[in-house]
Image (tube, rainbow, N blue to C red):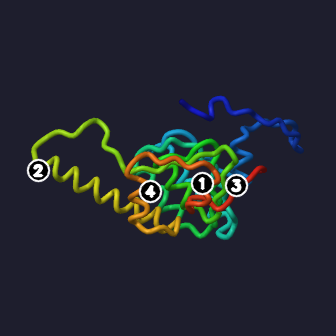
Amino acid sequence: MNIYAETPRILRETAAGYTTFEVVDEMFHNRELECVGEINDQSVYSLCRQLRHLQQEDPEGEIALYINSPGGEVSSGLALYDVMQAISCPIRTVCLGKAASMGAILFAAGDKREILPHGEVMIHDPLIYGGVGGSALSVQETSRQLLKTRQTLGDILARHTGKSRQEIYRKTAKNTWFSAEEAVSFGLADRVINKL
């Protein structure tokens, strides 16, 4: 589903007459980006380009990243995480609705992390989709890679929450949901906000 297909348009009078443009264009101009829906190669590639462009425009200017995501592909999410960490711009993450799974990792990685009162954050261990098959050695390699990914994600959450890796592992052993206030208490968010 293309979330931008139903995006409202703005009508503005200019010296050349009236012009219309999408709300997302105005948001981009104001250094506001959206990570909405599933995290995958396509959505991440677009966000990475936008982040790099905004850094070129103003290397010190804050970028707001609004997140409402159930999560998605770990490799794609880690690519976006790396770009968020690599650019010089401070990134303000705002949880609208939910930041789950990989969405929670990205939300927690913000320099300033804000969540709306009814926002929720969910963390868990990485999952295997589509079942595991093949030879015993193939299954063993899949398991090794999954444990390596678990360690990577655990280290990232530990770094951004101030918790130990073992504390993170205890919480990610199952789907653990945090209300807005609980997310602040656990270190996944900095504060609950009532106004954007």
Q: Amino acid at mark 1?
A: Glu
Given contact means CB atoms under 8 Å apart, are the residues at marks 2 and 4 in contact? no
Residue 101 in the image: x percent, y percent? 46, 48
Q: Which residue is mark 1?
A: 182
Q: CA distance from mark 1 to mark 4?
A: 28 Å
Sequence-first disc among 4 and 3: 4
Judged by depth in the image, the label closer to the viewer, 1 or 3, is 1
Report the residue marked by disc 4: 79
| Amino acid type, label 4 | Ala
Q: Report the Cα–Cα distance between label 4 and label 3.
A: 27 Å
**Secondary structure under badge 2?**
helix
* CA–CA distance in space, label 2 to label 4: 28 Å
Alpha-carbon span between mark 1 and mark 3: 10 Å
Disc 3: which residue = 192
Residue 184 position (above or below residue 14)? below
State the residue in front, 160 or 57. 160
Q: Quadrant of residue 88?
A: bottom right
Query: What is the total number of numbered labels drawn onto the structure image?
Result: 4
Point 62% across, 30% down: residue: 5
Relative image position of residue 122 (x, y in whole percent): 50, 48
| Dot 1 or dot 4, earlier in sequence | 4
The residue closer to the viewer here, 7 or 104, is 104
The disc, 1 or 3, on the residue closer to the chain's N-terminal end is 1
Question: Regarding mark 4 in the picture, which secondary structure is present there?
Answer: helix
> Residue 42: image x %, image y %?
47, 43
Residue 78: name its quadrant. Answer: bottom left
The answer, for residue 44, to whether it is visible in the render is no
Kind of element beneath mark 1 = helix
Q: Which sits earlier in the primary sequence, circle 2 or circle 1?
A: 2
| Foreground tag (1 vs 4) | 1
Q: Is residue 142 left or right of residue 100?
A: left
Instruction: Say if mark 1 contacts mark 4, CB within 8 Å.
Output: no
